[in-house]
Every structure is written in structure tokens, then in C-alpha cells.
């Protein structure tokens, strides 16, 4: 209430050096708390159309990192924007509470290494230990997320461990079962031996590492071969060799039976891979190397040949009826670009192995598969020589055994990329396990169609990465052999012939006759459901729990306890309007959302998606707590403020799903280059308003009717900015919005305020009347900018708004800028000409400064007589020599400006292609088009600049397809003493010659500059009245007196005092 008192002028604005951004942000946080800003902003929009946003749930077992802050900032920007545009935007934080991350920490704490350890400790005890840590860092999350300015509801959050959430997950699964999309299969899957559970294919793709593994070639003597030959197979997983039951060749490849001259050994190998055999070529190790071809075969001719088992562990399979173990099979998945062209088959440890062995009768569907490895990755007693040894640790011993038996042909090392468990960071293996699957392949075409109904930013992630993933989608294994998770709601008979899929707690209570308050395993595993067949034993729940990705993919329904509650709210507002996460979720959350919504409702779960890239350390490596190669986010916020961090992150390639290297100096640069100039402009406006008296109020009509060119420019630019931001935000293209916003701020501070300083202070032409107009304009722009920027820099604009709003009529003042509507345009037509002219004027000034620097002619003391601006746009020339001429003259210290539309008078023209504009259009013809453009005559280039086209290699090219270069013709336009510089658009020509008159003007400017520096060193404010005098000594006295007398008016105007 104190802030909103009627008639109060703005508070004094402290000096920029005294404005501490982090401290001021902390004060704003307290203000938000005092007015309950976040919840009040939502209450103000109740009854208005919903904007539905889904927040992907993170784990609370670790602290937020820059990836969370980046994604959270994107979410915050978009939801704030839509709230300002009249939408009711509920924002609930979510927590992923189940799964491997939690169990892994408890396993480490309790030294649990196996299922037996869990059961010995007690399932109930184990799960309650898990429950006790899931929200360990929730307070730290809330503090840090709130501190970076994100508005989201932590009190009304959702947790995947809540019974209501879990019940909806059951409902989702039951619906999939009713649609025939659930089945139990025996499938080779990525398997984490550390966690003792299978992983989905997309989980297996999350953590690949470059590793070195043994690469061995092993011999398999062929029974009855006339040459006594042995087949040779190559593998990088020697641990799978004890389970070998077949060898696979490519049916169409050529294979040779060769005798190695050095060793006299005879092998069968792919013709293209003979060189892989040791001794097949002469070298230092094999001076007698070489080979003799004894026979040649197609792969298909080898199929059915029997060979001697490599190791004895499963040799008994040869005796089984109709079993084709230890024979040659064929399949086209075999390649000849590595290895020997023969692949050893261990069907329990390879997807292709399983498929091919099933096809050729080596194993039977539903039958036992040789799998002598337990869930901890250790050999069972089926392989007594290595029993209890982890498979990855057994490689050396297996290789030694093969060498001792004479079956080892070669032993090398292979460097390759290998999947690791994304949580335990241990190598995965592939292992056949019984699992429950969702039949994704059945709905693949629907998935592709649903993907087309969504908008992704950037689009290429959707069109390429995600589309390709969907095209190759496999059935999804949703079960995990774990403990802390949502139990799969299947009750089955012992033989699996009868199953019941439960879709609600009420249904379970009805079928079991028991009250159910929690549906974690330790509460329901003992519950039995009577069999439908009288006399049969009761059904018991299967042991597995859901993959946590299934839970997060169910969050659109489970967070609202659908369909048990909020039915109309959900159904009226599905799909969601917006989601956002990192690129890694393409195969994670984005995928599971799409699969489940397509399967359930035949539509995508979301309409719009922003996908961000990865934030890397400054050295380009992944951020690592262990390496400490990045500064903690809290340190950055404490040093530079949250707004600076937000702008730094979202004004980077990472918003286009590209990686970025995080550098602390980049955040500081945002403070220095964006916030301080912006703050100083705000402070200057406040000081200018103060000079006009406590009763000053900005006059919108005065601003709108101003004829000042920079007033017209900044107001037109503001309207153009509002239109642009609205269009791009509604297309979710933050990567175009943020640069445009920063460009506008730079123009406001470096053009409007800088060129208008005397006018704003009331010391320019027009005096106080012009000051009132210009301050009204600047106030209008500043106030609008606080609203436009509020989704992006919520703290800084709030600080300004709370002060600026004191100049508003009481009914228009709000307790927070975040309660305001997003600005609309003024309703006046924009002025593209003045916007373009000012932009080009700045190009002229930049080129003029560079030209002065090149010739060592300082602006402050070396005025010049003449400048020529060369450009074909006569409207711009009229502006730069007319209404904008005074600004250019002052900035570049030139007396006269001329415009010239005849480019050939001062320069020669050349053109190069605009590759970005032409790339898609001309395609492979680019080289020929480029050569044609380079050959264009000056007349043709002028024709294009005038709006025409030229034909180049059959393409009609216009001004948007070319970049025109202007090169100054030495001696043009007045002979010696002229030089020019251009940027490819505007050419600036300066007369560099000096005379006595210019020298005296330069002296007057230097005296003025010295006086201004003295005022600054003395700590005086611009409004402080001073007397300015000088004492001239020696021979220069008469000259100086004459200079001061001749330039008295200009010096008085600059110094606000006579000299």
C-alpha cells in the first residue's frame, strides 16, 4: 500500500555502481512473498481459458544442475508469457520417486548386492528405506528453483509414489491390456548386472562409452570335413563363448577353405576377411606367411554343417531330439567389414542370436535357452569352471582356457563404443529375460501420424531424430525385476494360464476383500485373488514393478488422478499446450508420452515442445561433480544474479538443441553489456523526470504526437517488437525472440538515450517542452519493456516497474509487473522507413568511426568538413542528410553530409551469393550459380537492387539472393584526401583534409571535453550548476581566446554554462 500511494513521485534511483543485482533480486523475492505474487497471478486468471503445461518429473536424490535451470527457465518464460496473455496457467512441480536411482543409493548404504540380500533385510524395510530418501533434497530444489525466478507450485506438487498417482498408472496399464497391447515375452534385452534388472532400448542408449575389450578369433573344427578344416569366429565378448550353440554365416557371401603356410592350419573364413587370420600375410612375425585356397563355398552351402563344441558345458544338447545345436546357420545380419564373416551364436545374450537360433531350431519357442548367468552377472553352476565369477571379469580366464585347448586363433584388443547402465555406470550385457511388454510395433503408424500433429522447436529434432526413432521403434519392456516402484497390477496363476489385470484400488479391494491404503509391493504382494476356476489355487501378483519411464509417461493422467478425478478438466484440455526438456528426452520422456497417449487416445500428449541442448563445461567436456569443472549454479547467482544467468543460457545455441560451453565470464558479460546499460538508461530517465518536478506525469498523447525522428523511431520499433515477440512466442521460437529483445535494448540505450541526452535534460533545443515529450516517450517505452521482458528477466523488470508505476494513475498501478497483460501495439501504423533509416544511420556512424580510427583522427578534437553517404535508397539518403543528419554530424564531428544514390560515382559493385537464402533453392547447382553471380555486371547488380531480377543458370535471382559489395574508387568524388569504408550495404566517404577553421573547431571541442572530464572527476551531478573559466598563458592565449569567442554558443550548450 505504501508503494501505491496517490501522487507520489518515483524514488531516487541509485548509481549503477551501487546497484547490486543479486541483492536487489533477494529484495524482489521478499516482495513476491509479501503479495503472494505467484498464486495471485494465477487467481487473477481463474475462469479464463486454460493453458496446459506438463512438467517432467526429476529425481530429488540430487541437486539441480544447469540442465535443470535451463529447461526450467524455458518453461518459466513460456508459461509466464501465456499467463500475461489471458490464460489460466497452472504450474505443478513433479517428483520422480521410484526406480533405480533411489534403490542404487540404498544398495550402497546397506551394502546390498543381490535379491537374496533384499529379502534377508526385508522387502518392507528396504522399501521404507527408499521412501525415506526420495525427497532428501526437495527443500534445496525449491530454494534454488525459486531463487532463479521460476514460478511453479511446490506445495501442490505431484509425486510418483502417491497412491493416487500409482492408481492412475494401473489404469493406464489396464487400458493397454484391454486393447491387446500387453504381452509377456522372453526377450534378449539390455541388462544391468549391478542393478539386476533389464533396461529398455532407449535407456541402453543413454550412456555409451569408448572402451577397450578383448577381440578373439576362435576355431570350431568341422565334423567330417575332407580337409580337416575348422570354422573361425570373431567376438569381443569372450564371456559368451561358454554358451555357444551355433555359428552364423551370410548366405550370399563367398567363403574360403584356406591352409596357412606358416602354421599348416586349415580354416574356413569369409573371402573378404582372410587377411584377419594370423599368418595369412608375410610380416616380421610370420616371414613364411601366406595361404593356399583349398575350396570355395557360398555361405548357404555351409548351413547345416556340424562342428565340435567349443566348451563342454552344453554339449549334451547334441543328444536332444530335433535339436540343431552346434550347427551352421545363416542370416543376412552377418557383415564382412569386420571379424571373420562368421558369428558365434549365444541365443541368451544377443537379439539376433536368439532370433536366428529360434528360426533354425537350435532352441525351441517356449523352451529353455542356455543362460548360465544370474541377475548379478555371475556364472551359475552350469559353468563350474567359472562359477560365481562376473562375466566381464572372466574374459581372461576363458581366453587362457581356450589357448590351453588349442582353440584360440588370435587374441587382440578392440576399441569401440559400449553401453553402460545410465545409473550405476557399469557395463551392460544383453541377456534373455522374461518381461512384460507394450506392443509399440503394433501402433507404429499411429505414432508417426501423431508426431506430425505436434510442433517441435527446433523442427529438425522432430523431423529427423524423433521420426527416425519412431520408425525403428520396438516393443517396450515395461517391467523391472526390482522392488521400489509401482507394482505391475497382474495377478496370475502359477503356470500363467490365468491372469487378472487390475485397474484400480477399488477393484483390488473388491477382488481380495481387503482394505488397501498403499499399493507398493510390501503392502500388496501377499494379497491373493480367487481363481475364476473353482478348486484352483488363488492368483498371486507377479513380482515385477513398472519401469519408471512408464510412470513418467503416465503423468498427464496420473498427476490429476484421471479417470478417478478431474475427468472433465483433463478431457477438455488434452493434449497439453506445451512441454519442454533436454535433447536426451527424445528417447525418454518425449517418447513415452507419445507412446502412451497414442495407445490410449490416438492423439499426441502435447501440441508444442521446446527441446534444448546440453550445457557443457567450459572445456567442452560433460559437467562433472567429480572433476569440478564448472562453478555451482548458486555461486553464479550469488555473484551475478539469476536474471543474468537466465539471459546467458537462453541467448545461446542451447535453445536450438545445440550444445553450449558454460563460461562464468559469459554471465558477467550479460551484466556488463545488457543490464548495466539498461539500468543506466532507466536511471537517466528517472533523473530527467525528477528535473521536471514532483508533479510530472508522462503524457501519452504528447508522446504519440511527437514529430522528433528518434521518438518516431523508438515508438515504431516498440510496436514492431511487440508484433515480432507475439508472433515468435506463439511459434515457441525463443531463439529468435531473445536476440531481437537484446537488440532493442541496445538501440534504446545506445541510440535513443545517448542521442537524446540534452533533450531529455531540457538543455537542448525546445527546452522543457521537448524534455516533457522525450521523457514521456522514454517512460512509455521503459514501462512497455518491463512487461515485454518480464517472462525473461522477472527480477530486474519488477524492480523497475515498482518504481515506474508510481507515475501511473492509481487505477493502473499493480503490485507486480507479472500481473500485467502482455503489451499490444499502439494501434498506429509502424514506420518501416524510419526504422530502416535509423538502423542504416548506425551503420554509417560505425563505418565513419572505423574510418577515423584507421586514419588516427579522434572525434573529440579533429572535426571534418564533408561526408558522403552512398546508397541506392533515396528515402534513406533524405533521412540521413535531413532529420537524422544532426545526430550523424555530432557523432562523427562532420560539418556537411551529402547523399549519393549513384553508387558508380564512388565505388565499384560486385555480388556474391547469399548461401543461406539460396541453399535449398538451387541445391547441387550452387557452384554454377555462384560462378554466374560473380560474373554479374555492375548494371545487372543495380537492376537487382532496384527491385528487378537477373537470370543465372536458369534461376531468377532477386535482391534477397545476393550480397552486394561496394569498393571505393580511389580519387573519386573530389580527388585527394578522400577515403571510404562500407559494410556491403552502405558506403561512407570522408574528406580527411584539415584547414585552420577545422583546427580551431577541434580546439573548442577539446576545451569542452576537458571541462566535462573535470565535472565528472569532481563528482558533480548533471543538474549541478557550475562556473567554467580558463586561464590562457603564453603565445597560445590569443588563439584560445579567439576560439572560445568564436564557439561560445556551442560550448555553452554542451556545458550548460558560459565559458
Image (cartoon, helix red, strand yellow):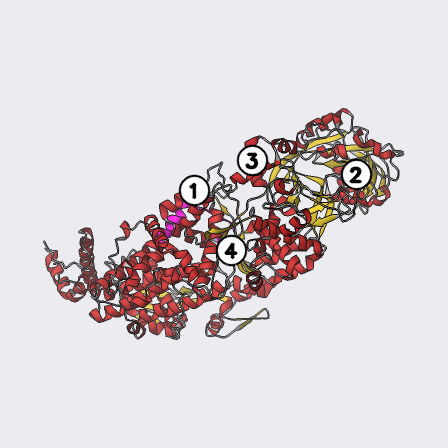
Q: CA distance from mark 1 to mark 4?
A: 24 Å
Q: Is residue 762 above or below residue 170?
A: below
Label 2 environment density (alpha carbons within 10 Å; few <14, some 14–19, many ≥20): few
Residue 660 in the magenta stretch? The answer is yes
**What secondary structure is marked by label 3?**
helix
Picture quadrant where residue 1023 is located = bottom left
Give the mark nearer the N terminus: 3 vs 2. 3
Query: Mark 1 and mark 3 in contact (Cβ < 8 Å)?
Result: no
**Circle number at residue 368:** 2
| Residue 45 placement (x, y as % from top left) | 44, 64
Residue linked to disc 1: 632
Residue linked to disc 4: 656
| Residue 828 placement (x, y as % from top left) | 38, 75
Give the mark nearer the N terminus: 3 vs 4. 3
**What secondary structure is marked by label 2?**
loop
Q: Quadrant of the N terminus?
A: bottom left
Query: Mark 1 and mark 2 in contact (Cβ < 8 Å)?
Result: no
Whether residue 490 sits left or right of residue 578 in the image: it is right
Whether residue 781 sits left or right of residue 736 in the image: it is left
Q: What residue range appears in magenta? A: 653-674
Residue 244 visible in the current orientation: yes
Q: Is residue 139 above or below residue 318?
A: below
Q: Is residue 890 above or below residue 674?
A: below
Task: Please report the residue visible at 69 percent of the width from the left and 28 percent of the height from the top.
Answer: 388
Give the mark nearer the N terminus: 1 vs 4. 1
Number of numbered labels in the structure image: 4
Label 4 environment density (alpha carbons within 10 Å; few <14, some 14–19, many ≥20): many
Amino acid at each position: 500500500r505504501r508503494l501505491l500511494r496517490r501522487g507520489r513521485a518515483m524514488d531516487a534511483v541509485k548509481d549503477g555502481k551501487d546497484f547490486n543485482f543479486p541483492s536487489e533480486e533477494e529484495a524482489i523475492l521478499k516482495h513476491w512473498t509479501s503479495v503472494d505474487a505467484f498464486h495471485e497471478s494465477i487467481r487473477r486468471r481463474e475462469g479464463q481459458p486454460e493453458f496446459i503445461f506438463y512438467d517432467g518429473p526429476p529425481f530429488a536424490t540430487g541437486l539441480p544442475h544447469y540442465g535443470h535451470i535451463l529447461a526450467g527457465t524455458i518453461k518459466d518464460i513460456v508459461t509466464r508469457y501465456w499467463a500475461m496473455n489471458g490464460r489460466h496457467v497452472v504450474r505443478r512441480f513433479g517428483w520422480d520417486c521410484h526406480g533405480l536411482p533411489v534403490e542404487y543409493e540404498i544398495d550402497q548404504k546397506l551394502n546390498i548386492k543381490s535379491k537374496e540380500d533384499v529379502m534377508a533385510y526385508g522387502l518392507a524395510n528396504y522399501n521404507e528405506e527408499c521412501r525415506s530418501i526420495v525427497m532428501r533434497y526437495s527443500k534445496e530444489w525449491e530454494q534454488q528453483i525459486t531463487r532463479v525466478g521460476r514460478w511453479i507450485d511446490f506445495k501442490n506438487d505431484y509425486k510418483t509414489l502417491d497412491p493416487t498417482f500409482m492408481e492412475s498408472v494401473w489404469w493406464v496399464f489396464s487400458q493397454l491390456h484391454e486393447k491387446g497391447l500387453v504381452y509377456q515375452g522372453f526377450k534378449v534385452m539390455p541388462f544391468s548386472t549391478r542393478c539386476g534388472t533389464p533396461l529398455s532400448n532407449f535407456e541402453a542408449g543413454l550412456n555409451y562409452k569408448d572402451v577397450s575389450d578383448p577381440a578373439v578369433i576362435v576355431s570350431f573344427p568341422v565334423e567330417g570335413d575332407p580337409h580337416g578344416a575348422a570354422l573361425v569366429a570373431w567376438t569381443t565378448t569372450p564371456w559368451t563363448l561358454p554358451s555357444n550353440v551355433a555359428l552364423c554365416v551370410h548366405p550370399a557371401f563367398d567363403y574360403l577353405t584356406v591352409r596357412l603356410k606358416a602354421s599348416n592350419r586349415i580354416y574356413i573364413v569369409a573371402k573378404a576377411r582372410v587377411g584377419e587370420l594370423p599368418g595369412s600375410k608375410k610380416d616380421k612375425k610370420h616371414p613364411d606367411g601366406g595361404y593356399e585356397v583349398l575350396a570355395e563355398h557360398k555361405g548357404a552351402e555351409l548351413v547345416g554343417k556340424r562342428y565340435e563344441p567349443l566348451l563342454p558345458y552344453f554339449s549334451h544338447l547334441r543328444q536332444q531330439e530335433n535339436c540343431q545345436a552346434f550347427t551352421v546357420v545363416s542370416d543376412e545380419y552377418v557383415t564382412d567389414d569386420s571379424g571373420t564373416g562368421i558369428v558365434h551364436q549365444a541365443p541368451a545374450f544377443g537379439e539376433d542370436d536368439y532370433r536366428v537360433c529360434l528360426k533354425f531350431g537350435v532352441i525351441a519357442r517356449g523352451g529353455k535357452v542356455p543362460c548360465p548367468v544370474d541377475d548379478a552377472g555371475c556364472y551359475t553352476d552350469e559353468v563350474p569352471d567359472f562359477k560365481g565369477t562376473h562375466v566381464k571379469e572372466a574374459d581372461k580366464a576363458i581366453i587362457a582356457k581356450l589357448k590351453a585347448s588349442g582353440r584360440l586363433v588370435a587374441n587382440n584388443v578392440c576399441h569401440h563404443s559400449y553401453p553402460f547402465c545410465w545409473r550405476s555406470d557399469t557395463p551392460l550385457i544383453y541377456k534373455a529375460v522374461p518381461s512384460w511388454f507394450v506392443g509399440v510395433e503394433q501402433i507404429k503408424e499411429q505414432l508417426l501420424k501423431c508426431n506430425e500433429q505436434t510442433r517441435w522447436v527446433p523442427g529438425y529434432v522432430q523431423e529427423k531424430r524423433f521420426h527416425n526413432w519412431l520408425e525403428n521403434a520396438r516393443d517396450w519392456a515395461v517391467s523391472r525385476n526390482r522392488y521400489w516402484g509401482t507394482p505391475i497390477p497382474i495377478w496370475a496363476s502359477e503356470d500363467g494360464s490365468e491372469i487378472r489385470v487390475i485397474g484400480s484400488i477399488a477393484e483390488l479391494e473388491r477382488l481380495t476383500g481387503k482394505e488397501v491404503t498403499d499399493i507398493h509391493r510390501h503392502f500388496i504382494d501377499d494379497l491373493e485373488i480367487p481363481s475364476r476356476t473353482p478348486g484352483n489355487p488363488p492368483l498371486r501378483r507377479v513380482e515385477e514393478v513398472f519401469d519408471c519411464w512408464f510412470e513418467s509417461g503416465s503423468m498427464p493422467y496420473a498427476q490429476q488422478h484421471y479417470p478417478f478425478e478431474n475427468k472433465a478438466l483433463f478431457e477438455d484440455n488434452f493434449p497439453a499446450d506445451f512441454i519442454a526438456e533436454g535433447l536426451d528426452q527424445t528417447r525418454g520422456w518425449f517418447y513415452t508420452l507419445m507412446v502412451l497417449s497414442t495407445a490410449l487416445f490416438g492423439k499426441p500428449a502435447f501440441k508444442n515442445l521446446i527441446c534444448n541442448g546440453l550445457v557443457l563445461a567450459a572445456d567442452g567436456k560433460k559437467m562433472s561433480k567429480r572433476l569440478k569443472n564448472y562453478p555451482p549454479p548458486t555461486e553464479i547467482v550469488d555473484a551475478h544474479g539469476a536474471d543474468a544467468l537466465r539471459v546467458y543460457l537462453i541467448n545461446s545455441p542451447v535453445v536450438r538443441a545445440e550444445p553450449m560451453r558454460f563460461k562464468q565470464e559469459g554471465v558477467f558479460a550479460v551484466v556488463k553489456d545488457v543490464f548495466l546499460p539498461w539500468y543506466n538508461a532507466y536511471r537517466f530517465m528517472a533523473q530527467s523526470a525528477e528535473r521536471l518536478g514532483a508533479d510530472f506525469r508522462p503524457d501519452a498523447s504528447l508522446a504519440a504526437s511527437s514529430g522528433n525522428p528518434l521518438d518516431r523511431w523508438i515508438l515504431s520499433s516498440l510496436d514492431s517488437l511487440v508484433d515480432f515477440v507475439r508472433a515468435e512466442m506463439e511459434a515457441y521460437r525463443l531463439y529468435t525472440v531473445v536476440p531481437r529483445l537484446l537488440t532493442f535494448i541496445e538501440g534504446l540505450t545506445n541510440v535513443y538515450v545517448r542521442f537524446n541526452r540534452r533533450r531529455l535534460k531540457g538543455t537542448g533545443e525546445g527546452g522543457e517542452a521537448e524534455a516533457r515529450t522525450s521523457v514521456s516517450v522514454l517512460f512509455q517505452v521503459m514501462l512497455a519493456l518491463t512487461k515485454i521482458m518480464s517472462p525473461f528477466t522477472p527480477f530486474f523488470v519488477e524492480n523497475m516497474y515498482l518504481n515506474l508505476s508510481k507515475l501511473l494513475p492509481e487505477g493502473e498501478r499493480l503490485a507486480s509487473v507479472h500481473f500485467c497483460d502482455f503489451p499490444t501495439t499502439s494501434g498506429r501504423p509502424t514506420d518501416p522507413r524510419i526504422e530502416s533509416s535509423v538502423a542504416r544511420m548506425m551503420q554509417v556512424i560505425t563505418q565513419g568511426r572505423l574510418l577515423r580510427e584507421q586514419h588516427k583522427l579522434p572525434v573529440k578534437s579533429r572535426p571534418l568538413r564533408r561526408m558522403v553517404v552512398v546508397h541506392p535508397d533515396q528515402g534513406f539518403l533524405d533521412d540521413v542528410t535531413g532529420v537524422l543528419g544532426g545526430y550523424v554530424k555530432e557523432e562523427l564531428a562532420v560539418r556537411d553530409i551529402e547523399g549519393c544514390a549513384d553508387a558508380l560515382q564512388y565505388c565499384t559493385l560486385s555480388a556474391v551469393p547469399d548461401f543461406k537464402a539460396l541453399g535449398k533453392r538451387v541445391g547441387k547447382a550452387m557452384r554454377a550459380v555462384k560462378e554466374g553471380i560473380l560474373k554479374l555486371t555492375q548494371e545487372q547488380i543495380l537492376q537487382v537492387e532496384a527491385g528487378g531480377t537477373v537470370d543465372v543458370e536458369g534461376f531468377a535471382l532477386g535482391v534477397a539472393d545476393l550480397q552486394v559489395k561496394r569498393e571505393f574508387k580511389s580519387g573519386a568524388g573530389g580527388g585527394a584526401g578522400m577515403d571510404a569504408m562500407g559494410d556491403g550495404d552502405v558506403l561512407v566517404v570522408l574528406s580527411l583534409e584539415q584547414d585552420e577553421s577545422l583546427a580551431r573547431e577541434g580546439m573548442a571541442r577539446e576545451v569542452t571535453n576537458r571541462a566535462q572530464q573535470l565535472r565528472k572527476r569532481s563528482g558533480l551531478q548533471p543538474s549541478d550548476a557550475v562556473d567554467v573559466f580558463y586561464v590562457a598563458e603564453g603565445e597560445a592565449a590569443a588563439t584560445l581566446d579567439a576560439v572560445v569567442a568564436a564557439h561560445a554558443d556551442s560550448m555553452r550548450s554542451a556545458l550548460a554554462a558560459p565559458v
